Image (cartoon, rainbow, N blue to C red):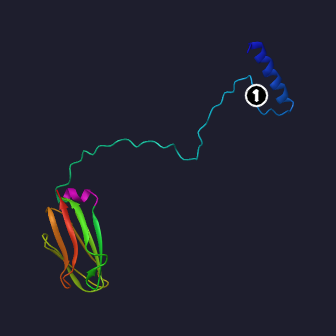
Amino acid sequence: MRPLTILATLAAVATLTACGAETTSPPATQPVATTQTPATTGAPPETEPPATTETEEPATTAEEAVEKETPTATIRLENGAPVGGAARIEVTRGDLVTIRIRSDTDEQIHVHGYDLTQSVGPGRPATLTFAAELEGIFDIEAHESGAHVAELVVSP
């Protein structure tokens, strides 16, 4: 299309628009340029989080373990048996472990290998907190009922 024809067509469209006439589309001979604007929801655009590399050495002493997140297990005993079966507690050597126990009967909880015991009973929950210094698999049992309460797995 010639430049003069384009100018004349644009002038005609401008005149019609200024007079209040509606135009539904530009003339068929005129190319239409469109742009798309992304929809916004008010939320910031999603971006990939930066890659991170952990360079911190694993904790190997009780003091270093305090600074790490403490693995916590909660166990409930009814009639001397663990509700839902024996728990499996998996930690890494050096972790500070917390085991919370509630019981509807009087019990002595014993963590084998660590030789830790704690009394628990109705209205007297028990909390055992210790550094997992020994590697291996250790049974946790209720001495009065003889129930296997949990298994502590300490990995290197």
Location of residue 82 (image quadrant): bottom left
Location of residue 8 (image quadrant): top right
- Given the image, on which type of amino acid does mark 1 rest? Pro
Q: Is residue 138 left or right of residue 31?
A: left
- Report if residue 91 lies within the magenta region: no
Judging depth in this view, the residue of 90 and 27 nearest the camera is 27
Q: Quadrant of the N terminus?
A: top right
- Segment colored magenta: 63-69
Q: Is residue 137 left or right of residue 32?
A: left
Judging depth in this view, the residue of 83 and 49 nearest the camera is 83
Q: Residue at x 84, y 28 (%)?
A: 16
The residue that disc 1 covers is 26
Judging depth in this view, the residue of 126 and 19 nearest the camera is 19
Q: Quadrant of the C terminus?
A: bottom left
Q: Residue at x 48, y 44 (%)?
A: 46
Dominant secondary-structure state across the stretch colored magenta: helix
Q: Is residue 89 above or below residue 32?
A: below
Binning the other alpha carbons within 10 Å of mark 1 as few (below 14), some (14 to 19) or many (20 upward) gives: few
